[in-house]
Amino acid sequence: MHAPSPRHPARWPHLARRCAAVAIALAACAASFEAVAARADAAPSAPQIEALERAAAATVGLRIEATDDATSAQSLGRQREGSGVVIGDGGLILTIGYLLLEAQRIEIVTSDQKVLPARQVAYDLATGFGLVQPLVPLRGVRPVPLGRSASAAPGELVLVAAGGGAGGVGMTQLVSQRAFSGYWEYHIESALFTSPPVPNHSGAALFNQRGELLGIGSLFTTEAVPGHALPGNMFVPVDLLRPVLAEMQSTGSTRASRRPWLGLTSAERSGRVEILRVNRESPAEAAGLRSGDVVLAIDGAKVETLEAFYKKLWQHAEPESEVELTVQQGEAVRTLRLRAIDRMRTMRKPAGI
């Protein structure tokens, strides 16, 4: 899987051109694109056209500038671009949350290239969603209806819409729906995977052919189908939004986001959890963990997958909990005690907030 990074916002080239950049999966991507193109030949009905036009009109571009000392700038950059989609009255916009990390300025770019100031409403660490509110009226844009992502089936043709100057609408195909564990201490029980991929996926909106929102774009992957070298995108499903939307609007996050964080970037390799990177000024760094270490157990329980690792970590009721890790460092096996922290408390805030 590749990083969910918006650092280099791409234009909207032909879908197959983006696939060609992934040499190891070029043949699979080309075949997937041809299959989608062949199935897309049927003329859509008038109601479908209206629904999809409404969906595209509700998709906006986002420009974000992070604070000067943003800890997230190392992986995401300070200048970020992505997309969002209007889901509520007053212009409430749903996007992918990592775009908003430590943001000091947010701008909305409408389909007619108007630039409007906005503020962050919420960032939910548990789901990965973010909410943005325009500071001036977003006129002429109707919210899109939320679909049921669980009812979408592999093989279904779907549409991806991105906003801003590099925006557009493209057709792709849902190829799998499964649990997803991210290397950045993130896990959701159901994620949507599509192929062929779109390049400007950060915050892009995924729609069914009725114009209902199914998910929000998170990252590019080379394995959209498990066990196959098929490039695609992962989308966070809107089914995760319904239970937490009101809480996000009222508190800026959710209770589920208050959980222990160690500051590790990890990967599953041959049935082991290997540490790839240790965040600066994190509990992991303070405990002496380093790149190349292998996590063997947490609190005495053996772990072989990221999912098992995270779920055991998050069993601690409070973010600031003591966690015991058994790790292999070279030839030595060590037991380390870490004092986990609340991830959101490490984030820099703009002056005055």
Image (tube, rainbow, N blue to C red):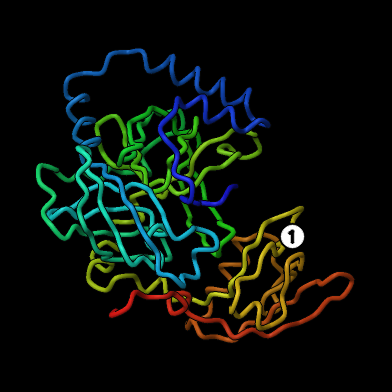
Q: Residue at x 62, y 68 (%)?
A: 264
Residue 96 location (% of width, % of height): 38, 54
Name the residue beneath numbered marker 1: 272
Q: Residues within 10 Å of mark 1 (few under 14, many from 20)?
A: some
Q: Residue at x 28, y 67 (%)?
A: 248
- Residue 178, above or below 283: above
Foreground of the two, 198 or 315: 198
Quadrant position of residue 122: bottom left
Residue 266 location (% of width, % of height): 65, 62
Foreground of the two, 118 or 327: 118
Foreground of the two, 161 or 150: 161
Residue 327 location (% of width, % of height): 76, 73
Q: Kindly give the residue lying farthest to the right in the view shown.
A: 331
Q: Residue at x 31, y 37 (%)?
A: 207
Quadrant position of residue 182: bottom right
Q: Kindly give the residue lying farthest to the front in the view shown.
A: 68
Q: Residue at x 16, y 60 (%)?
A: 135
Residue 162 location (% of width, % of height): 34, 39
Callout 1 amino acid: Arg
Quadrant in the picture for the C terminus? bottom left
Q: Is residue 70 left or right of residue 204?
A: right
